[in-house]
Image (spheres, rainbow, N blue to C red):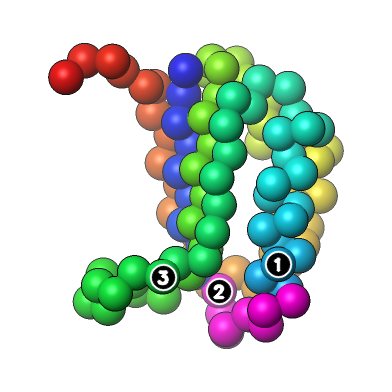
Amino acid sequence: MYEHLVSFKFKEELSASLEKELLDALYALPSEIPGIVELTAGINETTETGNIQGYTLGLRVTFADQQALLAYGPHPAHQSFVSKLDGLIDNVIVIDYPISNKK
């Protein structure tokens, strides 16, 4: 399995309705894109103010395998979500890694 972590930094604070629209769009992805095992997303509520750096929306997607992760980016449902971000994003951090059961 592969983990896909994303932190979004927006140019300005989003309205509650736009936050809900983006979260709803993210939570619709597992029903539209094969290979998504689990998806969680939310608005940052950390109290660690020194570490936020303006990143306010987080996303974690677990994929069945690397092929599913690679197919996710160009998938039309993902591209539809990306188009909702047009003009809103200041920066995005993405981390992808294979999940290991080693402890």
Q: Residue at x 55, y 52 (%)?
A: 41
Residue at which label 3 appears: 45
Instruction: Give percent across and percent down for residue 30.
Output: 71, 34
- Asked if residue 89 lies in the magenta stretch, the reply is no
- Upstream in the sequence, badge 3 or badge 2? 2
Residue at which label 2 appears: 10
On the rendered structure, is 38 left or right of 23? Answer: left
Query: In front of the other: label 3 or label 2?
Result: 3
- Asked if residue 12 lies in the magenta stretch, the reply is yes
Quadrant in the rendering for residue 19? bottom right
Q: Marks 3 and 2, Cα distance to the nearest angstrom? A: 15 Å
Residue at which label 1 appears: 20
On the rendered structure, is 5 left or right of 31? Answer: left
Question: In the rendered image of this protein, does residue 103 appear above or below residue 78?
Answer: above
Question: In the rendered image of this protein, does residue 21 appear above or below residue 18?
Answer: above
Q: Nearer the viewer, residue 96 or 42?
A: 42
Query: In front of the other: label 1 or label 2?
Result: 1
